[in-house]
Image (cartoon, rainbow, N blue to C red):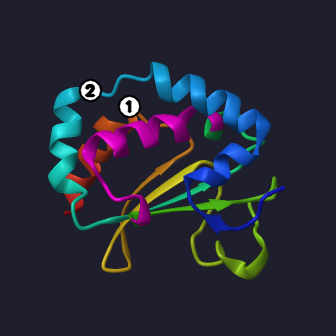
Amino acid sequence: MMSDKSGREKLMESPEMKEKYTTEYTVYQPDFTAVQNLKSLLADKEVIIVLGTWCSDSRLHVPHFYKILDQTGIAENAVTLIFVDESKQVMGGLTENLNIEKVPTFMIRKNQKEIARITESPLVTLEHDMVKLLNKNN
């Protein structure tokens, strides 16, 4: 189990995640208008993704999320991945104050304060949910 804070390359160390990531990232086509809106909405934000490589929702939605982020041009260093075990815990207490109940959990923060969260699965799509949440909380 991977249990640390890292970047996208760490995803590829998990065979099941690497296989699903490659497929899902390639086929996912984010909504163009939503992505254009997200370019400004995400401009000064940081993203924390809490995931489990064992989780089918993580293997589906994390590649989609990265495709959206890549199309918005958000910097790779603005994104933090936290890998958790099946009890949603990680060594070092990285998730201690994050209230993680399900994975994946996508948190968008501004000035160290959480302003939006998508838990497990989006209501519509990740990009539409982010636009709605960020417009409401920006």
- 114 w.r.t. 76: above or below: below
90 sits left or right of 10 in the view: right
Q: Nearer the viewer, residue 123 or 89?
A: 89
Q: Residue at x 41, y 37 (%)?
A: 67
Q: Which residues are magenta?
A: 59-77
104 sits left or right of 91 in the view: left
Q: Position of residue 42 (x, y in %)?
A: 25, 57
| Cβ–Cβ under 8 Å for marks 2 and 1 | yes
- Amino acid under label 1? Thr
Toward the top, the furthest residue is 27
Secondary structure under tag 1 reads loop
Q: Residue at x 30, y 66 (%)?
A: 45
Q: Nearer the viewer, mark 2 or mark 1?
A: 2
Q: Position of residue 26 (x, y in %)?
A: 48, 23
Determine if the magenta segment contains residue 44: no
Q: Position of residue 48 (x, y in %)?
A: 49, 62
Q: Position of residue 13 (x, y in %)?
A: 74, 47
- 29 w.r.t. 74: above or below: above
Q: Say which quadrant the C terminus sits in.
A: bottom left
Residue 31 — which label?
A: 2
Secondary structure under tag 2 reads loop
Q: Could you tell which of marks 2 and 1 lies nearer the N-terminus? A: 2
Q: Which residue is mark 1?
A: 125
Q: Say which quadrant the N terminus sits in.
A: bottom right
Mark 2, other Cα within 10 Å: few <14 / some 14–19 / many ≥20? few
